[in-house]
């Protein structure tokens, strides 16, 4: 994904932020942390309040390549570049906190004042809307199956018919989707552990977001032994999450996404990370 595009203000975790993140992760995403509660700073743009002065703090779950992952000591990726546009519009820099995905989708991290936004390749669902507000969709997603070469798998039905062991990432829509089809997959806390389980033979096939699978297959050690077995069109769309009722920031996020799609910036970022122009957005 080599297309160059300036990255603005993605800061490394400070010791203080890292300690706070560790605390949150250690209690399984529980929001009981007093670190940032009540510490808001008024932004100079549109009356937006931020949890840390001069920063747009983003909660994410690393790695989830190509949306967010570590590279040369920085967290980079498609989601990072999209949120950088919002930070630029606000006249601040983006700071990233890496936390458990369950604490993101539940709204616990946002409600605890840990971050202003959540950008983690997160699908918009009705269940998640009960806990957080979402921006307009910024990415059309789908699921995929990754299996050993020569497995003969072309669908979930094949997985079931062959009696194969299926793996999925916990707290994801991919997990929900295969469960809705009658599967009881082995769950893994993050995507790297899920991939490792497949490589180690703990499972025969895994379900994961298609862009993540395609990124894995660019790695020689993965492509040598595994292949895209099937694409599952689930009609998903990603959104940036915010604390419920944070309408001022939500407006800025939505305006930024829409402007980027109109002026070509979105297409540049998309091509940088996925190598192609985006397809027309789903209705």
Image (cartoon, rainbow, N blue to C red):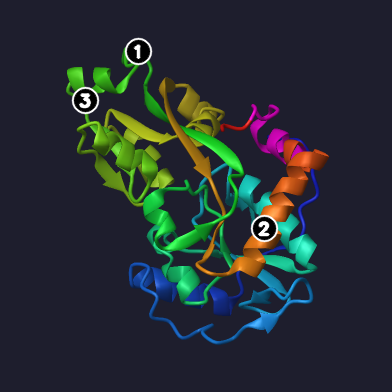
Tag of residue 49: none
What quarter of the picture does the N terminus occupy? top right
The residue closer to the viewer here, 196 or 108, is: 108
Q: Locate residue 82 relative to residue 163 in the image: left or right.
A: right
Residue 197 visible in the shown view:
no
Give the CA distance from mark 2 to mark 1. 45 Å
Res 143 → quadrant: top left
SS assignment at label 3? loop
Where is residue 176? Give x, y as percent: 31, 42
What residue would you read off at disc 2?
253
Determine which quarter of the picture holds residue 74.
Answer: bottom right
**257 relative to 153, above or below:** below
Single out the mark in the foreground, 2 or 1: 2
How many discs appear?
3
Tag 1 residue:
150
Label 3 to label 1: alpha-carbon separation: 14 Å
53 up-or-down from 151: above or below: below
Q: Does the magenta stretch include residue 275?
A: yes
Residue at 70 percent of width and 49 percent of height: 257
Among numbered discs 3 and 1, the one appearing first in the sequence: 1
**80 magenta-colored:** no
The residue segment tinted magenta is: 268-280
Front tag of 3 and 1: 3
Left or right of 151 on screen, residue 19? right
């Amino acid at each position: 994904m080599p297309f160059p595009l300036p990255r603005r203000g993605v800061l490394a975790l400070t010791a203080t932020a890292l300690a706070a993140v560790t605390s949150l992760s250690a209690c399984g995403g529980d929001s009981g942390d007093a670190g940032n509660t009540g510490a808001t700073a008024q932004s100079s743009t549109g009356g937006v309040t931020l949890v840390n002065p001069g920063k747009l703090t983003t909660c994410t779950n690393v790695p989830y390549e190509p949306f967010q992952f570590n590279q040369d000591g920085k967290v980079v990726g498609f989601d990072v570049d999209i949120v950088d546009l919002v930070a630029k519009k606000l006249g601040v820099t983006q700071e990233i906190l890496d936390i458990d995905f369950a604490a993101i989708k539940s709204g616990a991290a946002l409600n605890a004042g840990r971050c202003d936004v959540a950008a983690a390749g997160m699908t918009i669902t009705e269940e998640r809307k009960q806990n957080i507000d979402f921006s307009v969709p910024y990415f059309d997603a789908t699921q995929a199956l990754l299996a050993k070469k020569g497995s003969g798998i072309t669908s979930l039905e094949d997985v079931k018919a062959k009696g194969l062991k299926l793996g999925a990432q916990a707290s994801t829509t991919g997990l929900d989707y295969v469960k809705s089809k009658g599967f009881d997959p082995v769950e893994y806390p993050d995507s790297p552990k899920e991939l490792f389980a497949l490589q180690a033979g703990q499972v025969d096939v895994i379900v994961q977001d298609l862009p993540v699978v395609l990124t894995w297959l660019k790695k020689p050690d993965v492509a040598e032994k595994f292949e895209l077995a099937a694409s599952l069109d689930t009609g998903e769309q990603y959104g940036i999450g915010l604390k419920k009722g944070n309408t001022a920031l939500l407006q800025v996020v939505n305006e930024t996404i829409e402007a980027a799609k109109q002026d070509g910036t979105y297409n540049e970022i998309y091509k940088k990370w996925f190598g192609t122009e985006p397809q027309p957005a789903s209705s």
